[in-house]
Amino acid sequence: MSDEIIDNRARNRYELGVNGFTAHVDYVRTPGTIRFIHTIVPEQLGGRGIGSKLAQHVLDEARRNGEKAIPQCSFIAAYITKHREYQDLVPA
């Protein structure tokens, strides 16, 4: 598995390529916030922790960029619930 997650700003998504497939988290940025819209992990890549790897990366990036995270995506929302260290990124 590649460890390189890229921010494909032209497509408004973070991407991770694995074995010819691309997992991604779609987003919309506004000043000071990033809204996570959807997480896609192709069926062929399921069960390998790829979704969690993407979630951790995008949330860490939001923190580094000083952005608040709006978890519209149910996967990212569940990840934040499970990993309390990211709850401060969600606006009150």
Image (spheres, grey):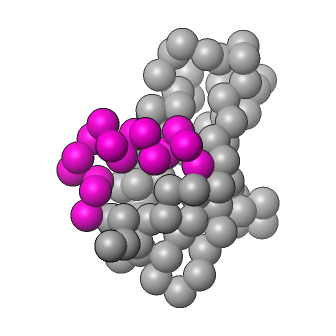
- Residue drawn at (47%, 22%) of the image: 49
Image x and y of residue 63, in percent: 33, 65
Query: Is residue 78 magenta-colored?
Result: yes
Q: Report the front residue among 19 and 79.
A: 79
Image position of 58 (left or right of 35): left
Q: Quadrant of residue 53?
A: top left
Image position of 80 (left or right of 37): left
Image x and y of residue 28, in percent: 65, 68
Image x and y of residue 16, in percent: 62, 38
Image position of 11 (left or right of 56): right
Can residue 29 be seen in the rendering of this structure?
yes
Q: Report the front residue among 35 and 1.
A: 35
What is the residue that sits farthest to the left in this orientation? 85
What is the residue that sits farthest to the bottom in this orientation? 31
Q: Quadrant of residue 29?
A: bottom right
Q: Quadrant of the N terminus?
A: top right
22 vs 85: above or below: above
- Residue drawn at (41%, 74%) of the image: 67
Q: Quadrant of residue 30?
A: bottom right
Can residue 63 be seen in the rendering of this structure?
no
- Residue drawn at (73%, 24%) of the image: 42
10 vs 77: above or below: below
Image x and y of residue 12, in percent: 71, 62
- Residue drawn at (49%, 45%) of the image: 76
Total numbered badges shown on the rendered structure = 0
Task: Write the start and end of the magenta stretch as one range.
Answer: 73-88
- Type of secondary structure dominating the magenta stretch: helix
74 vs 50: above or below: below
